[in-house]
Amino acid sequence: MAKPRARVAIIMGSPSDWEVMRAAEETLDELGIASDARVISAHRTPARLVRFLASAEQDGIEVVIAGAGMAAHLAGVAAAHTLLPVLGVPLPGSELRGFDALLATVQMPGGIPVATFAIGRAGAKNAALFAAAILARGDDAIRDRLAKFREAQSAAVPERPPRD
Ligand code: RP5
């Protein structure tokens, strides 16, 4: 069977980012949303970035999740090259444990917005859930799956703390 067309792009600055960014793919998989994960660096592969975003919209991509660490300009540069919503995930693999990437991602000058999420896996997961919420505006099946995800999440929280 042919793979469904990706509606969300997950881009990351380095293969070393995948360990964290796979949380975005896993969450989208759980919600039945096809995604396309790519290593695209704003500084090491600038031409790849421009090429990918030039055709992303016509290729069916509706949301871009961009994860990067250190001086993390990937999400901001990506946002400059597309009108699609860009969700930035600051990654923690630096001496500053992602605080550098958080500031670089969140402190976009006015004019080119990047929605910024938490540092690391929580951010990657929430970016995927946020992408699902965007898609759910025009897709009842995704809205239903998102509602079920929330229900299951609530049901999994115990009433009392675990005692040994
Ligand atoms: C950023 O630099 C990447 O997003 C990565 O988080 C960081 C370090 O990259 P590597 O040196 O591990 O490839 O561009």
Image (cartoon, helix red, strand yellow):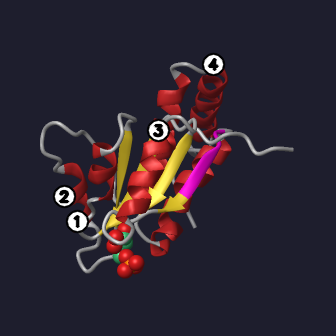
Quadrant for the C terminus in the image: bottom right
> What residue would you read off at disc 2?
103
Q: Is mark 3 within 8 Å of ligand 1?
A: no
**Cβ–Cβ under 8 Å for marks 1 and 3:** no
Helix, strand or loop under label 4: helix
Q: Which amino acid, by three-letter code, is at mark 1?
A: Phe
| Magenta-colored span | 33-37
Query: Can you tell which mark lies on residue 99?
Result: 1
Q: Are marks 2 and 1 in contact (CB under 8 Å)?
A: yes
- Which residue is disc 3 drawn over? 63
Q: Magenta stretch containing residue 89, yes or no?
A: no
Figure quadrant of residue 113: top left
Q: CA distance from mark 3 to mark 2?
A: 22 Å
- Sequence-wise, the earlier of marks 4 and 2 is 2
Earlier in the chain: of badge 1 and badge 3, it is 3
Q: Which mark is residue 140?
A: 4
**Residue 92 percent across, percent down from the top left:** 34, 69
What secondary structure is found at the residue carrying circle 1?
A: helix
Q: Is residue 74 left or right of residue 64?
A: left
Query: Is 9 placed above or below 103 here?
Result: above
Q: Relative to 133, does residue 94 appear above or below in the rendering?
A: below
Q: CA distance from mark 3 to mark 4?
A: 17 Å
In the rendered structure, which amino acid carries the disc numbered 4?
Asp
